[in-house]
Amino acid sequence: MRSGIVLVGGEARRAGGMEKYFFEICGRTFIDRLLETLRGAVDEIIIVARDEEQCRRFDPYPYVRCIPDMRRGIGPIGGLHAGCLAAQGEAVFVVACDMPCINGQVIETLFEGLGDRDAVIPCWDGDMYEPLHAVYRRAALIEYLQEHESLSLRAMIRNLDARFVSVETFRTFDPDLLTFTNINHVGDLERVREVLEGSCGEKKDEKSL
């Protein structure tokens, strides 16, 4: 069984306090795009929110289980821990809610590459990784997250038996590597819209947050 974990619980400070999963591209929200792709790639989807109030915003998605953070205020590490404890799959795909262009074939390739390792993590040239667009062995994550000193994702992946896969591997499925697009600032949204508008036929004057 494969699980998908979507982390939505951040405070969105870099996006002006706006919750990024309701931003729109091509007339659809980030969360709609994410969940549609995940439904074709995993057997269950778990959304980790910061609290029960935020969870209620996902009531329109009956096929999703939303849980609140167990360890609040410590960043994505806390969300990962809660998501892994709730997941039923042996392998989990973890993704941040600000990545609206995830590619199902890329996700499948990551799952297939797990083998007997603890994780399969895309990497760029140098020391740049995509820990929030990666597949992990659930048991290995739980073991690490039960007792750790650092709140850094980089420290986490260094303590796992991880396979690092160059992002160039995925250009066969995703020539522009859009799957790794993330929206940290409102300005990033317009940049991504400009890239995608031709493929989705969206007119610039119709775009809105």
Image (tube, helix red, strand yellow):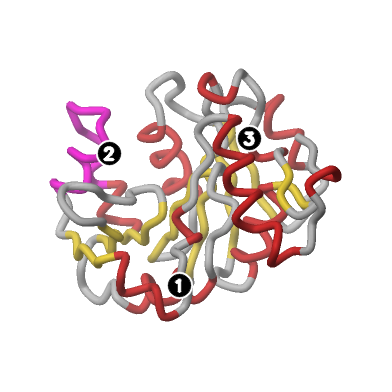
Q: Residue at x 40, y 48 (%)?
A: 132
Q: Residue at x 63, y 40 (%)?
A: 190
Q: Which residue is mark 1?
A: 175
In the rendering, at what x and y percent does residue 162 appear?
Answer: 19, 60
Q: Which residue is mark 2?
A: 153
Few, some or many C-alpha atoms within 10 Å of disc 3 (few <14, some 14-19, many ≥20)?
Answer: many
Going by the numbered disc 1, the residue's amino acid type is Pro
Q: Earlier in the sequence, mark 3 or mark 1?
A: 3
Q: Which residue is mark 3?
A: 20
Q: Earlier in the sequence, mark 2 or mark 1?
A: 2
Going by the numbered disc 3, the residue's amino acid type is Lys
75 drawn magenta: no
74, above or below 132, in the image? above
1, above or below 191, in the image? below
Q: Which residues are magenta?
A: 143-159
123, above or below 193, in the image? below
Q: In the depicted view, which residue is nearer to us: 136 or 134?
A: 134
Q: Earlier in the sequence, mark 2 or mark 3?
A: 3
Going by the numbered disc 2, the residue's amino acid type is Leu
118, above or below 186, in the image? below
Q: In the depicted view, which residue is nearer to us: 12 or 187?
A: 187
Few, some or many C-alpha atoms within 10 Å of disc 2 (few <14, some 14-19, many ≥20)?
Answer: some
Using residue 140 as the reference point, say whether residue 203 is left or right of it. right
Label 1: element kind: loop
